[in-house]
Image (spheres, rainbow, N blue to C red):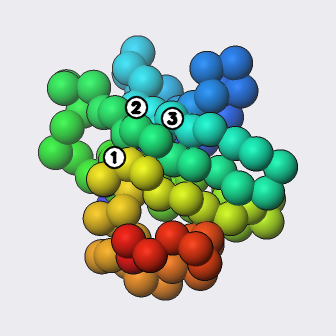
Amino acid sequence: MKPTYLLKNNRINKQYEFHIEGSIPKVEYRRTKEKIYLTHTEIPKKLEGQGIASQLVKAVFEEIERQGLTLVPLCPFVAGYIQEHPEWKKLVAKDVNSM
C-alpha cells in the first residue's frame, strides 16, 4: 500500500505541494475566481517513478472539486492523467476541447 501524503496549498508560490523526506513535489497553478489553471507538475528526481505525481494530481483534483472550481489543464502531465482517469473530466472547463 502506498503511503498517503498531506496536500498543502502554498498560496504564496501558487502551488500545491506534498512534503516528502525534505523534497517538495508540486503542481503549479494560476487562479481566477471560478477557474484554476494547472500549469506545471514537478517531481524531484529522487522521488520519480514512485507514483507520487499521480497521487499529487489526484489530491489536487479532490481539492478543486471540494472548492467547486473549474479546471483548465495546461500541464501535459495533468492532461494525460485526465485521459487515463476520465472520471475527472467533470472538473474540466466546458470550453477546453483538448480532452
In screen coordinates, is 36 left or right of 47?
Answer: right
Residue 17 lies, in percent from the top left, at: 53, 33
Residue 83 lies, in percent from the top left, at: 33, 76
Nearest the eye: 37 or 41: 37
Question: In the displayed structure, would residue 19 be above or below residue 59?
Answer: above
Nearest the eye: 62 or 34: 34
**Which element carries disc 3, helix, strand or loop?**
strand
Q: Amino acid at mark 3?
A: Glu
Question: In the displayed structure, would residue 36 be above or below residue 86?
Answer: above
| Neighbours of disc 3 within 10 Å: few (<14), some (14-19), many (20+) | some
Res 64 → quadrant:
bottom right
Q: Residue at x 51, y 70 (%)?
A: 96
Instruction: Name the N-terminal-most of marks 3 and 1.
Output: 3
- Which quadrant holds the C terminus? bottom left
Q: Residue furthest right?
A: 33
Q: Amino acid at mark 2?
A: Pro
Residue 53 lies, in percent from the top left, at: 34, 47
Question: Dot 3 corresponds to which residue?
Answer: 28
The label shown at residue 52 is: 1
In screen coordinates, is 47 left or right of 33?
Answer: left
Q: Amino acid at mark 1?
A: Ile
Q: Are marks 1 and 2 in contact (CB under 8 Å)?
A: yes
The label shown at residue 76 is: none
The total number of labels drawn is: 3
Question: Is residue 62 visible to the viewer in this orientation of the structure?
Answer: no
Q: Residue at x 51, y 35 (%)?
A: 28
Question: In the displayed structure, would residue 13 be above or below residue 58?
Answer: above
